[in-house]
Image (cartoon, helix red, strand yellow):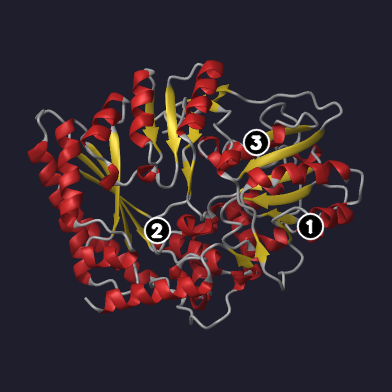
């Protein structure tokens, strides 16, 4: 049975006396294990607390919370009421957590809508990747946004906050507009907003909190190796909004690991990055970790980056499973997505890892992609079957259990990617495709299949490309309790036009945010996707 991370056994938490310091409550709108595995949340916690004039304490979604006590939400470090702080900052990585944001505001004794809150109550600010993709659905819920990468932003934010802490809320918010990437939630900007980017040497070197438990990064020292991705997969928001791709120096990473190991006595390191396989010194880093007798794990890694030497190092470092993300079953659809993994490469690598003694593979696929055909679904089943067969044939130890975990999720078009103009597939069609895949994959044996609900994915698509009109529905969903799924189906059905394809000449709600990939480039990439799909 998988053990939950234990908050009482964590190492690295920052506990300060509140006397003479400005108190900030830092919230993650989901459970503790997810919060502590999120490097962005950890980074903001460290950036705030390294200033001696600030005391920042965490809070998160607790399933055991007594809903009858509306103002009983407490901070993790000192069990002080969250609403006694001056500022609440939420870090949000997933649109589905917007409902949890409403829940936490209510548990803190705050009205969900910013206009209904008293001027003496804390400021409510939001950061995280979802906010600099499209913050509009939660505009009415918050006072402002910290958009962009925090390393270059938070120090300026702290100085502005401290210098104006005696001001009325409206005056303080006006001052905060001078902070790079700060956005007031009152109205959509009429001018373009450029977001702050961190220089590679400014990255927070490592995590400062870890807890015991069974989660993938529990009891691990998290270290960010690189940020962004040079591959340009046409569906991936992180690959576009975190441009340019940046690698940290091996020297700095080693120093960060040495410091963390010395301070907290970890024996395990979690290497984090969107493109670990593209880190030029990955082999040397892993060799150094094994020489230091440290085990390690990857947040993810491209299978084509795993050569014999790296595989040997991974086994020595205690890696038990490997993830392959083909995204599509057919080579033609992978090519259209710019996911350039051939069928032969995938099978060769699967055989290689089995021969080396790793029998657990995680596979990720998308369904509902524009131009997807039945042959593409058949190709998913055939690819999984072929992977299992080559792994069974390649294993040298016949007792090695070959276990495939297959995650199949509906494609969600994301802003600031070439696919932002694409349609979300019809829920009915997605259900039919899932039924087909469940049946086909079920015949293979040794395959665990996980699929996201099409309704849940459709709701994510609404929020990804929606506007302020969704805020009241978030409040309704938070209050729905047991009837949430029924209400969600109605909301999705009522917003089917939001899921439709967009014309590339239309203005988009989120166009006021600028990233390093311009609109003309994204259009060319979308045209390229369509032409590749149509040419098959």
Relative depth, front residue between 450 and 48: 48
Q: Quadrant of residue 183?
A: bottom right
Identity of the residue drawn at 61% across and 49% down: 149
Place residue 438 in its image quadrant. Answer: bottom left
Locate residue 372: give its quadrant.
bottom left
- Viewport quadrant of the C terminus: bottom left
Query: In the picture shown, does residue 119 fall above or below 44?
Result: below
Q: Label 2: which residue? A: 453
Instruction: Count residues near mark 2 (Cα–Cα under 10 Å), then give few for <14, some for 14-19, many for 20+.
Output: some
Sooner in the amino-acid sequence: mark 2 or mark 1: 1
The residues tagged by marks 2 and 1 sit, at their Cα atoms, a distance apart of 39 Å
Tell me, yes or no, whether the two marked residues, 2 and 3, touch with CB atoms within 8 Å: no
Residue 400's x, y, as percent? 15, 30
The residue positioned 9% from the left and 30% from the top of the image is: 398
Question: Residue 423: x percent and y percent?
Answer: 42, 74
Residue nearest the observer in this picture, 334 or 11? 334
Name the residue rendered at 77%, 28% in the picture. Answer: 52
- Mark nearer the N terminus (2 vs 3): 3
Q: CA distance from mark 2 to mark 3?
A: 33 Å
User: Distance from label 3 to label 1 (Cα)?
Assistant: 22 Å
Tell me residue 261's x, y (percent).
Answer: 50, 19
User: Which numbered circle lies on residue 45?
Assistant: 3
| Marker disc for residue 177 | 1
SS for callout 3:
helix
Depth order, front residue of 237/386 = 237
Binning the other alpha carbons within 10 Å of mark 3 as few (below 14), some (14 to 19) or many (20 upward) gives: many
Query: Dot 2: what SS?
Result: loop
Please name the residue shown 39% across and 69% down the image.
Answer: 427
Labels 3 & 1 near each other (Cβ < 8 A) = no
């Amino acid at each position: 049975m998988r053990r939950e991370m234990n908050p009482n056994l964590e190492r690295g938490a920052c506990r300060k006396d509140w006397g003479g310091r400005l108190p900030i409550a830092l919230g993650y709108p989901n459970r503790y294990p997810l919060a502590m595995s999120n490097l962005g949340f950890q980074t903001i916690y460290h950036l705030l607390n390294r200033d001696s004039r600030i005391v920042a304490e965490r809070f998160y979604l607790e399933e055991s919370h007594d809903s009858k006590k509306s103002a009983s939400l407490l901070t993790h470090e000192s069990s002080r009421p969250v609403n006694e702080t001056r500022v609440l900052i939420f870090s949000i990585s997933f649109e589905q957590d917007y409902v949890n944001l409403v829940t936490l505001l209510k548990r803190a004794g705050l009205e969900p809508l910013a206009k209904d809150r008293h001027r003496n109550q804390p400021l409510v600010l939001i950061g995280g990747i979802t906010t600099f993709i499209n913050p509009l659905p939660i505009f009415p819920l918050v006072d402002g946004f910290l958009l962009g990468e925090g390393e270059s932003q938070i120090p300026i934010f702290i100085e502005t906050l401290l210098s104006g802490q005696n001001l009325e809320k409206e005056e303080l918010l006006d001052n905060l507009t001078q902070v790079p990437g700060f956005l007031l939630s009152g109205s959509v900007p009429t001018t373009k907003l450029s977001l702050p980017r961190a220089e590679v040497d400014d990255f927070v070197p490592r995590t400062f909190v870890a807890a015991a438990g069974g989660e993938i990064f529990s009891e691990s020292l998290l270290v960010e190796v690189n940020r962004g991705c040079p591959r340009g997969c046409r569906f991936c928001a992180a690959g576009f909004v975190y441009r340019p791709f940046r690698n940290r120096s091996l020297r700095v990473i080693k120093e960060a690991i040495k410091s963390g190991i010395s301070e907290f006595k970890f024996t395990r390191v979690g290497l984090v990055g969107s493109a670990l396989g593209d880190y030029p010194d990955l082999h040397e880093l892993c060799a150094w970790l094994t020489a230091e007798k440290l085990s390690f794990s990857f947040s993810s890694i491209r299978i084509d980056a795993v050569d014999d030497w790296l595989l040997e190092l991974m086994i020595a470092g205690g890696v038990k499973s490997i993830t392959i993300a083909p995204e599509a079953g057919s080579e033609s659809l992978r090519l259209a997505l710019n996911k350039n993994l051939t069928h032969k490469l995938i099978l060769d690598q699967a055989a290689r890892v089995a021969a080396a003694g790793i029998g657990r593979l995680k596979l990720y696929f998308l369904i509902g992609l524009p131009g997807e055909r039945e042959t593409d679904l058949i190709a998913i089943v055939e690819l999984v079957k072929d992977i299992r067969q080559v792994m069974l044939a390649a294993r040298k130890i016949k007792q090695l259990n070959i276990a495939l975990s297959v995650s199949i999720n509906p494609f969600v078009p994301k802003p600031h990617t070439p696919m932002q103009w694409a349609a979300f597939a019809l829920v009915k069609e997605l259900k039919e495709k899932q039924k087909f895949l469940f049946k086909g994959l079920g015949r293979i044996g040794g395959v665990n299949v996980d699929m996201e609900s099409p309704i849940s994915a459709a709701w994510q698509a609404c929020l990804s490309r929606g506007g302020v009109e969704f805020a009241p529905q978030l409040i309704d969903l938070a209050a729905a309790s047991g009837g949430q799924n029924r209400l969600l189906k109605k909301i999705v059905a009522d917003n089917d036009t939001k899921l439709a394809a967009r014309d590339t000449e239309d203005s988009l709600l989120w166009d006021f945010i600028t990233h390093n990939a311009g609109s003309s480039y994204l259009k060319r990439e979308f045209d390229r996707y369509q032409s590749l799909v149509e040419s098959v």
